[in-house]
Image (spheres, coloured by chain):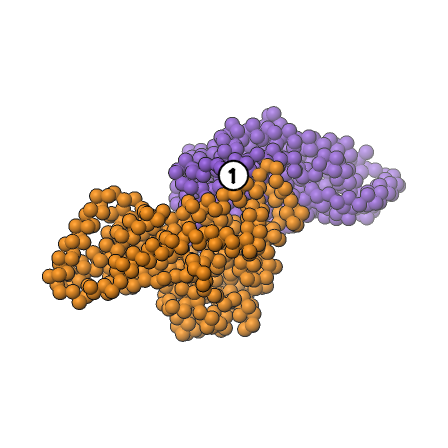
Chain colours: A purple, B orange
């Protein structure tokens, strides 16, 4: 029954029962973590053999003729650039390979804007009141990068089709607005994929700032959970078609394909921006880890190999998502106290609990031994104006633990809602 | 015979003979490279077994209980931090592990100064005319980092004891001077080690700028070439003793211990600066590659393991240095046209050819198929005021090729000197 229309005496009895259930949960002394999009150990095992492909008797010479153990090849091995280009659907000559973290490439690119500037403009560090658009709910680590550099974070609501484009088109008339964070496919945390129209409108932006850039973090480009994966329009092609070649930086990694801690990252950019990145990285590093690139190329081979591998990942991940969604439906549907997304890919389920309850739900879960992403984390400065959004990361715990964790989550969602409704009485 | 006191007719005959020899060299169509301090393939083979220590059947859990394949442990594995701390002679709790390039950590640290600032001062990007001290001849990639960020590079002459400390102490009275690059042991390219007095005076600096920092790149800390290695005073201890805990950033890597392209880097700093670095890296990356750390810890074990490994490196490297020094002595000693260093470690021999001849020598070598580090590279902005210094990197070519390359180098040194002496006639 809908909590909101429940007569108060019944709501009180319900609350008492929920509290009793919560106490029993606390007695179990759980210690579970659904805070971050960490792959489970079973998923990591899928890539174990990769580690055997570069050993003491393996060939160390890349396609380019370089000994991968030594210095050199600053842009990355040609074979690795080609593989990432296939994944990112951009030309290989515009791809630069990084280390194990695409976040690092994003940070470096923002940092490049701060100290060097883009398109011949003054570095952002020397401009006043520089702003960055943050579609929200969104990825907390993105927001943290631009917050670190002291930029003003502007919240843009996420719709089912991507960022609110009317608002984005309006905001970029302000020349202080220098960029926008995007996770275009299976967005973190909503799981939605940007519609074709959203991608076209992004590619066609005419920002007042010449040094405005889209930060296109295609983190889940091949991370499907169903047999009918979402389709994302190719932003690279769209930008080119609309004469906006240097509008976007493109990022991807194998963090959630092979190993989160030891994957391969890549960035791509239009010709002028690519030259700026090349210049930066020629100063910044002696070159990326080519042995790890060799491992990846030998293991994944090509986009076909990646897709086959991702089908094995899906076989492990999809049941976890299904388990969470089943529980949410059983426990929370029709109660008027929560709604959630049913993503076709990615790593997260986004739940909106009753307004003003998200922090309380996270705290209740934590006090009973289940760690969730902090409430508010999906908004700039960690502040969810409605205190409603909670990001659920089902990948890490084994299914049976996940069931327990979600049972507790549903219970806490009801408990917090009842608490609030009774308080408002 | 000394070229400078040679009668002109004899010098002309000598020149003609040298030219004839040079033509014969050109006919050989050599293709050799002594440009960078790249270890030879034989040196890389010494670490081949390291690649077998993290394979599909290996334990993946670190001392800290973390699965090294997954996200987490942003400061690096405790066992890796301990190993680097031993190498760097600093406390492990002040060590942060990076990726495969310590240059990257240095770049990031300068970048941190640019956008965030140190000791609560304005970020360097917002201060005017920021200057950086560059002991020269020095490491071109250091200078390139600070040049990239638009800082004014101030040349400080290198002496046999390190940077000219009278000058350094004078220059830091200028509050626009924010740092100094140092390779304190087996300096690149001179091979000298800073004297105890130099280290003490550096540790005792009282710069006008609160945000002045020593960038202490101890790249060759265990890279001895003789049985009587140089001793470097511990800057960390000296800074502490003199109440200057946050005066320096300390860098090191295993690039020239294991693999240049796939080693482990580290940075250490006093408590306040370490907090600033921790904050930065928590925003910048999902954490360093822990599988490569695991490989390194299992292979090198501890400082004893490192020293035993470096003795094997020395057995391969020392004969190359000996071959170069023997040739230089045979061909150039007593001719008044060149002098050079005889380092006890590191990767370079620094040769000063006749003033105004370095570019010509490098060009002549290049036209006969031997690539050297560009003349001037060892000075800020690539400009050697005397056009005299050339850095020789003997590590990469096999000994027989090295002999040929050095024969050519000596010939070109004589040729350029004779050319110039005849031209000045």
Q: Is residue A142 above or below residue B129?
A: above
Write the residue at 63% across / 47% down. B62
Write the residue at 38% across / 51% down. B395
Q: Which residue is at the front of the view, B269 or B324?
A: B324
Q: Is residue A163 left or right of residue B260?
A: right
Q: Is residue A174 visible?
A: no
Write down the quadrant of residue B128 in the picture.
bottom left
Write down the quadrant of residue A23 in the picture.
top right
Please identify the quadrant where the N terminus of chain B is shown. Answer: bottom left
Q: Which residue is at the front of the view, A357 or B197?
A: B197
Residue B93 point in image, percent of width and height: 61, 59
Q: Is residue B398 visible?
A: yes
Write the residue at 41% across / 35% down. A63
State the residue position of label 1. A55
Q: Is residue B148 above or below residue B50?
A: below
Residue A58 point in image, percent of width and height: 48, 36
Residue B4 point in image, percent of width and height: 19, 66
Write down the quadrant of residue A38 in the picture.
top right
């Amino acid at each position: 029954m809908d909590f909101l229309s429940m007569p108060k005496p019944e709501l009180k009895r319900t609350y008492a029962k929920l509290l009793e259930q919560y106490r029993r949960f606390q007695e179990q002394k759980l210690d579970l973590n659904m805070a971050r999009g960490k792959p489970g150990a079973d998923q990591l095992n899928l890539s174990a053999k990769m580690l055997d492909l570069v050993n003491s008797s393996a060939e160390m010479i890349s396609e380019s003729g370089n000994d991968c153990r030594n210095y050199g090849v600053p842009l990355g091995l040609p074979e690795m650039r080609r593989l990432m280009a296939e994944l990112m659907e951009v030309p290989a000559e515009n791809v630069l390979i990084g280390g194990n973290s695409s976040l690092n490439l994003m940070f470096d690119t923002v940092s490049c804007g701060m100290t060097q500037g883009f398109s011949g403009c003054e570095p952002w560090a020397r401009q006043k009141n520089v702003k960055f658009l943050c579609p929200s709910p969104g990825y907390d680590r993105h927001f943290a990068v631009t917050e670190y550099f002291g930029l003003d974070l502007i919240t843009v609501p996420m719709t089912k089709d991507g960022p609110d484009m009317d608002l984005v088109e309006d905001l970029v008339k302000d020349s202080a607005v220098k960029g926008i964070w995007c996770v275009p496919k299976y967005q973190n945390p909503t799981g939605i994929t940007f519609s074709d129209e959203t991608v076209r409108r992004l590619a066609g932006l005419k920002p007042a700032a010449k040094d405005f850039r889209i930060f296109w973090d295609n983190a889940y480009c091949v991370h499907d959970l169903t047999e009918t994966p979402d389709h994302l329009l190719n932003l690279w092609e769209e930008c080119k078609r609309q004469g906006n070649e240097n509008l976007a930086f493109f990022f991807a990694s194998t963090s959630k394909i092979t190993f989160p801690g030891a994957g391969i990252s890549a960035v791509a950019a239009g010709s002028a921006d690519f030259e700026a990145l090349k210049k930066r990285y020629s100063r910044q590093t002696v070159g990326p880890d080519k042995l790890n690139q060799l491992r990846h190329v030998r293991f994944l081979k090509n986009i076909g190999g990646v897709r086959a591998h991702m089908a094995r990942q899906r076989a492990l991940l999809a049941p976890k998502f299904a388990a969470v969604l089943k529980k949410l439906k059983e426990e929370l549907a029709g109660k008027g106290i929560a709604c959630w997304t049913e993503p076709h890919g990615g790593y997260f389920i986004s739940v909106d609990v009753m307004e003003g309850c998200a922090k309380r739900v996270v705290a209740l879960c934590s006090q009973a031994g289940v760690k969730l992403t902090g409430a508010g984390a999906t908004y700039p400065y960690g502040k969810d104006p409605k205190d409603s959004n909670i990001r659920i990361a089902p990948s890490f715990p084994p299914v049976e633990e996940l069931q327990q964790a979600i049972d507790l989550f549903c219970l806490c969602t009801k408990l917090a809602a009842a608490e609030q409704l009774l308080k408002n009485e």
